Every structure is written in structure tokens, then in C-alpha cells.
Image (cartoon, rainbow, N blue to C red):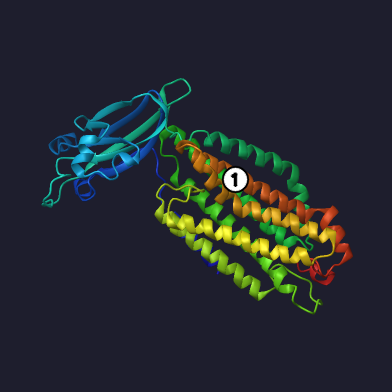
Amino acid sequence: MYAITTILIALVLSFCSADGKSVLGVFQSHTAWENNGQYITRFLYHGESGLLSYRLENVALAVHKEAKLLLFQGIESFENLSCLDRVSKAQFKIPLSTEEHNQTIPQQARPQTWHVMYADRYTCQEEELDGVLEDVGFQLIMLNPDSAGNPTDHFSAEEAGLHSFFFMLILAYFVASCIYMQPLWQALYKGGPMHTVLKVLSTALFLQALSVLLNYIHMARYARDGVGTPLMGNLAEFCDMVAQVQMMYMLLSLCMGWTLSRGRKSQSKPLQWDSSPASTALALGGVITQGALLIWEQFEDMEHHSYHGYNGLPGLLLMILRVSLTLIFASVLYQIISAERSTLKRDFYLNFAKGCFLWFLCHPVLVLLSILFSEHQKEKVITIGVILCQSISVVILYRLFLSRSLYWEVSSLSSVTLPLTMSRSQRGRF
């Protein structure tokens, strides 16, 4: 079931496209008539010398239709307006009467979202359109000023700085891998009681690093042409989603496995994180639920990002799921810790709880905190915060399961009552 969920996510993402700030498409009169204007895109301009540039394929047809671009500052400026009010109250009306045109956006004290719509003489007519009207092909480019004040920056204000952040993160991953790769590989090669958990943690960390690398490649190209490499962006989301699924499966299996196993009278078999059918079933249920919500969210949010602000129903349900899982983990670990007499074992479970809570709560908490920030800062706060918090969570779990001062001392006291331990006869299979 886990493999099926992963394959399904991959198939869905392969058909998703990333939205860029260099937009290619067609102006459609029927779409504009049905929706009181054809919505094109949005862009956060900042500073002065912002630029909107268009290029048309059929200027004569656009002139015949009396086509124009409508620019609104903020979605509340046009969302509840009638068709005629939209056309008359737009902050800018740009007639599509030439093959190319550059429109300068006025200076603004703080970043503002500008929405672009298309309308023509058929948009607000009451009677239904007769016949098939030919579409007008276009290319739309939106640019912010760079450090020198020239309009050459394709990044919207909410994306500014993410490119540099991903570069610094790649550098950090590279340095950490040079330092810790060999000891970790030796631990995995030797096997032992933590072999399975370390494999899952290593895989999740590798997928996170790969997601960061793919995002950097996408943004490096995006900085040049405003489109980037959408496939790279989609693959980055896919890698992050698989990492989320893997971590949820592992953490659920561990917590549920420990709780269900405590009721057994016989301790002849050592505890393993995936040995209980009940814990495996519960973990699969959580994984499938999260996978379904992640896929649903991709259909709801056309501007694809690895970390969303939870504006829609699937995002809200994902937040509720993660908070609910945190409460379940807290309840399970509280029962275990309160009944545990060994100080070393209690420390083991407490540190494990820190890693779990940080992994699942960072995203909902950062979404709530982002309310305090302005619009152009929200995405950066969520993206940077979640990546850093989940990386710290993985480090905490690594230190816990590799710690000689904690796990190996405790395991020497009782080799069959600790979570995730194995008898010597079983180590050879791993």
C-alpha cells in the first residue's frame, strides 16, 4: 500500500505544471465572458521601476476585439465587482494595440500584489456569444527592480531571497555529508538494532536534500527567464512528499508499536518497529490519509510550493491531521514515560518526543505565526522555517538512535525490553 501511494503521488505530480512570471498563453473571449474577465496571473511588485511587458501574436485581431489588460492592486479590488465595474475601476487599463508594450508600475512604499486580467468588448455583453471567436496568443513578462534598480528580476517579492537560501542549504548539506557520511555508512553497514530506523532517517534526509537541490536548479533557471524548469519544481515537491510519508510511517509505527507491545505478557520476542500488524495498519492509515490530502492540495493550489499556507480545505485538513497526530504521540509517550522507572529510558522517550513534535508541529505553528507577517514575507517564513525545523528534527532523532551515552547504555541493562532492540541471532538478517 505504501508503494502504491508513492507511485500515485508521482503520477499526479507528473501532470502538474508550475506557474511562472513569464506567462505564455492565449486570451480567450469566451473565458472572459463567462468569468467577467479572464484571470491571467498575479505578481508582487516592490520598490520602483517595476515593469509589465506583453507581446502579441495577432495584433489586428486584438484591436478588432478592443482587447485590454486590467491591473488590480489586491484581490479585494475586483473580487466582488460586477463586470462593468471591473473594467471601469481597474487601476490600470492597458490597450492591446501594439505587438509589444512595456508598462511601468508606479513606485510603492511596500510590496503590493497586482492581479492581471484580460477583457475585450465581448466580456460584459449580456447576450451569449455567437460562434467561435479566435484566440489571441500572448507572452506576458513581469519584472521587479534588481539591486541596481533595473527591472530585470523575475522573482516576485514573496520569492525574493529563497534562491540564496537554497544555495546556502545545499552548501550546509554538502559540508555535513563530508563530515558525517563515513560514520553513518559504517553504522548502516554493520547493521544492528537501529538499522531499519537509520535507513528510514537517511532516506528521508536524502530526499529533503534532493528536494532542496531541485528547487535551487529550478530557481536558478527561473531567475533568468521567469519560467524556470517546472519539472524540477514538481520533482522537488514529490521528493518532499515522499519524505513526509516515510517519516509519518516510521514515527507512527514506533509509537503505536511500543504502546501495543507493552500489553504483551511474553517478552520472548524483541520489539521491532514494524513487527506489530496493528501498529502497521494504523501507520498505513495515517500515511494513506496524508497522501490523499497532499494530492488533493495539489489540485486545489495551482501555484505549487513544497510548503503551503493552508488557504484551502485540504490544507486545513492536513493541519488538523498533524496536530491530531501530535496529540496522539503526546498521549502515547506520556503513558509510556509515566510507567517507566528507568531514568535512561525516560530520557530516550523524551528526546524521541521532541523530534516527533518538532517534525509535525513546525508547519501548523509557522502557518499561524505567518499571520503576523506581511503578505510578501509569509511564504518565506513558512518555507525556511519548516525546512530548518524538520532538518533539526532529523538531527535529534539521529543523535538519539546513534547515541552511545543513551541507547547503548540502556540496551546493556535490558536487551529485550527497549524499543527497537533485536536479539543477537536476528542481527545477521540485517
Residue 234 in view (yes/no): yes
Relative placement, left or right, of 197 versus 267 is: left
Q: Is residue 189 above or below residue 369?
A: below
Q: Is residue 277 above or below residue 369?
A: below
Residue 250 % position (x, y) = 65, 62
At 70% from the left edge and 44% from the top edge, which residue is drawn?
Answer: 177
Residue farthest toward the top in the current orientation of the protein: 148
Looking at the rendering, in which quadrant would you find the N terminus?
bottom right
Residue farthest toward the bottom in the current orientation of the protein: 265
Residue 333 % position (x, y) = 71, 63
At 21% from the left edge and 29% from the top edge, which residue is drawn?
Answer: 98
Q: Amino acid at mark 1?
A: Ile
Residue receiving disc 1: 387
Relative placement, left or right, of 272 versus 379 is: right
* Residue 143 quadrant: top left
Residue 181 % position (x, y) = 73, 47
* Residue 145 quadrant: top left
Looking at the rendering, in which quadrant would you find the C terminus?
bottom right
At 19% from the left edge and 48% from the top edge, which residue is drawn?
Answer: 33
- Give 72 or 420, whichever is nearer the viewer: 72
How many neighbours does mark 1 have within 10 angstroms: few (below 14), some (14-19), or many (20 or more)?
Answer: many
Q: Is residue 87 above or below residue 14?
A: above
Q: Is residue 125 above or below residue 199?
A: above
Q: Secondary structure at mark 1?
A: helix
Residue 12 in view (yes/no): no
